[in-house]
Amino acid sequence: MCVCDCYTLGSRFYVYTAEISNEVSDPSISSYIAAIALTMIAFKGFTTITNVGSEVINPNKNVGRAIIISIIISLSVYVLLAWAVSSNLPLQDIIKSKDYALAEAARPTFGKVGVWFTVIIAIFSTVSGVIASVFAVSRMLAMLSEMELIPHKHLGMPGSIQKHTLVYTIVVGMTVTIFFDLSRIASIWTILYLVMDMIVHWGLLKNLRNRVKANSFIVFTALAMDATILSVFVWVKATTDVLVVIISIISILIIFLSERWFLSKRLPN
C-alpha cells in the first residue's frame, strides 16, 4: 500500500474528479484533461521507490520494475474502484458524497456496515500512505541537505538531519492542512508537481541525456504531455478557483528565488 500510495485510493479519488466536474452533468474536454492532472498525483508513489533505490538489490533493474509494477497495481485498483462507484451511484451523488463516495457506493448492498467498514479501511490506508510519503520526503530532503543543495538548520534539535527534515515535513504538512481543504491541497500540489516534473524532464534533455542514455523521444513526449495537462488545469482553476493558481505561483517564486539565492552564495561565480 505504501509504495503505491494507496491512501489516494477510494473516496479521495472521487474528491478530485468531483471537484473538476463542479456539479456539471456534462463536463467539457478541458474538464476531463484537468481531472487527469489531479489523478496524476495518485501515481506519485514511484518516487517513494526511487528515494530508497540505494537499498534495493540490483537497483539498475529492480527500481524500474518496481515502478512499473506499482503503477500497474494502482491503475488496476483505481479502475475497479471507479467501476464499482459509478455502477452504484449516479454522478450527482458521487459529487455530493465527495470524501465518502466509496462508502456511499457500499451502502446499497451492505448498508451501514459496509459504510463503516469502507471508512475504517480508508483511514488505515490513508495513515499508511501519509507515513510512507512523509518518510520519503524527509529522506529526500536529508539527502539534498547533505549535498548542500538546500539550506538546513538544526534549530537546537538533536539527532540526524533526516530526523530534522522529518519534523519539518510534518510541521509544513500540518500547517497546509489547517489553512486549506483537501481539494485545494490536491490542486496546489498538482500544479507544483507538474512544474517540478517538467523541470526534471528539461534538465534531463539538456544536461544528462547522453550521460544516462535517455530516450529523447520518450522524455520530450512526457514533457509535452505535462505542459499540455498543466496548461489546461491552470486555465480551469483560474476560472473556478483563482486562489489556487495565485498560491501556486507565489510558492513557485518563493522556492525558486530562495534556492537561487542559496546556491549563488554557496557556489562560485
Image (spheres, rainbow, N blue to C red):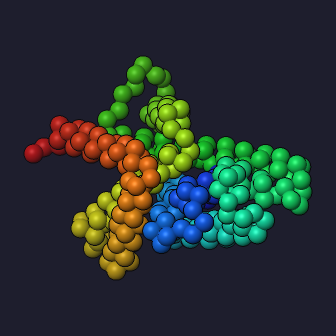
Residue closer to the observer: 206 or 14: 14
Residue closer to the observer: 266 or 129: 129
Return the x and y of residue 202 as percentages of the image width and height. 29, 65
Which residue does the image show at 82% across and 50% down from the upper left?
115
Asked whether, in this view, residue 172 is left or right of residue 124, the answer is: left
Asked whether, in this view, residue 87 is left or right of residue 232, the answer is: right
Asked whether, in this view, residue 227 is left or right of residue 256, the answer is: right
* Name of the residue lying farthest toward the left: 269
Give above or below for 229 relative to 94. Answer: below
Which image quarter is the N terminus in? bottom right
User: Image quadrant of residue 143?
Assistant: top left
Which residue does the image show at 49% across and 70% down from the upper left?
28
Give above or below for 248 relative to 56. Answer: above
Q: In the rendered image, is residue 199 in sight?
A: yes
Residue closer to the observer: 239 or 114: 239
Q: In the rendered image, is residue 160 in sight?
A: no
Return the x and y of residue 26 as percentages of the image width and height. 57, 69
Which residue does the image show at 68% across and 66% down from the upper left?
82
Return the x and y of residue 232 as percentages of the image width and height. 39, 65
Which residue does the image show at 32% across and 47% down from the upper left?
249
Return the x and y of residue 90 as percentages of the image width and height. 72, 65
Give above or below for 154 relative to 137. Answer: above
User: Image quadrant of residue 223?
Assistant: bottom left
Which image quarter is the C terminus in? top left
Q: How many marks?
A: 0
